[in-house]
Amino acid sequence: MFNIKQSSYILLFLVLTCSVSAKSINRQAYKVCKTNEKAYWDGSSSQCCDTTTHELVKNYKNGVGENGYGCCQKKENISSTSETSETSKKNYTFIGSINSKCCGGYLNQETIQYLPDGSIGVNALYEYSYQIKENGGSYYCAEEYSLMLNYQYGTRQEHFYYYKSDNKYCHKSIYYNGDEIEYQNIDCYCSEKDDPKNGKNCIP
């Protein structure tokens, strides 16, 4: 039989043990970050993300699916000029991350090339979009875009780079002479895993 004194010691031991255990758990579950940072779980550990310069997005992990968050650095619009050309990139965006690697980019880009007399030789307009796709158990950052090339002398080209399915990536090109279609072509690439853009040529 335990006496009152022994029972008191046991109770005190249990309280101290539980207290130490709780502090240990809290230290593992939470991360102290700076005032301009936010704590997040990257799928395997707690991290801090500076939300004034970065953006938190959902992270996807091969074989797991949606798994924590990624911390992606924001990017401002950029422009560059020279004697022969001007380029601008706008509207940088993220749609997620894959195995903690950010997926996204500039949505719009324009490049103007000038002739020696100062007139516009070629005007190239790009429009991008991004998705996270899965193929063969692997996630990938699917970049789709269109390219419009307008030449000084009335001819133009249209190019479309798109995913026909998760395992098929295609490029459609159309060449105009004035308003008449002079030539058009479609090429596609397929793979059983990862981004089909890097796969083998296949039937459109």
Image (tube, grey):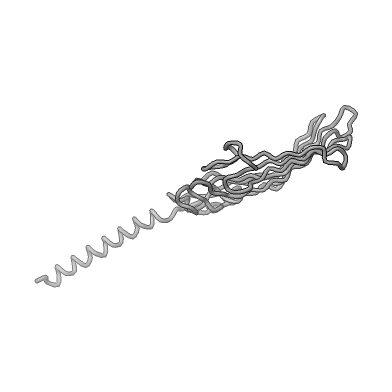
Total numbered circles? 0
The residue positioned 52% from the left and 54% from the top of the image is: 38
The spot of residue 2 in percent (x, y) is: 11, 70
The spot of residue 54 in percent (x, y) is: 59, 48
The residue positioned 67% from the left and 39% from the top of the image is: 187
Task: Judge from the rendering whether residue 36 lies leftward or rightward of residue 92; answer left or right.
Answer: left
Task: Judge from the rendering whether residue 32 lies leftward or rightward of residue 130; answer left or right.
Answer: left
Point out the residue furthest to the front here: 203
Name the image quarter holding the N terminus: bottom left
Classify 73 as above or below 23: above
Please state which of residues 11 and 26 is positioned toward the viewer in this rendering: 26
Please state which of residues 23 and 175 is positioned toward the viewer in this rendering: 175
Toward which corner of the image does residue 7 lie, by quadrant? Answer: bottom left
Classify 127 as above or below 14: above
Point out the residue furthest to the right here: 117
Toward which corner of the image does residue 126 lie, by quadrant? Answer: top right
Please state which of residues 159 and 105 is positioned toward the viewer in this rendering: 159
The residue positioned 52% from the left and 51% from the top of the image is: 59
The spot of residue 203 in percent (x, y) is: 63, 41
Please state which of residues 69 and 199 is positioned toward the viewer in this rendering: 199
Is there any visible trace of residue 109 in the rendered image?
no
The residue positioned 89% from the left and 31% from the top of the image is: 118
Task: Judge from the rendering whether residue 187 lies leftward or rightward of residue 102; answer left or right.
Answer: right
Task: Judge from the rendering whether residue 129 lies leftward or rightward of residue 5; answer left or right.
Answer: right
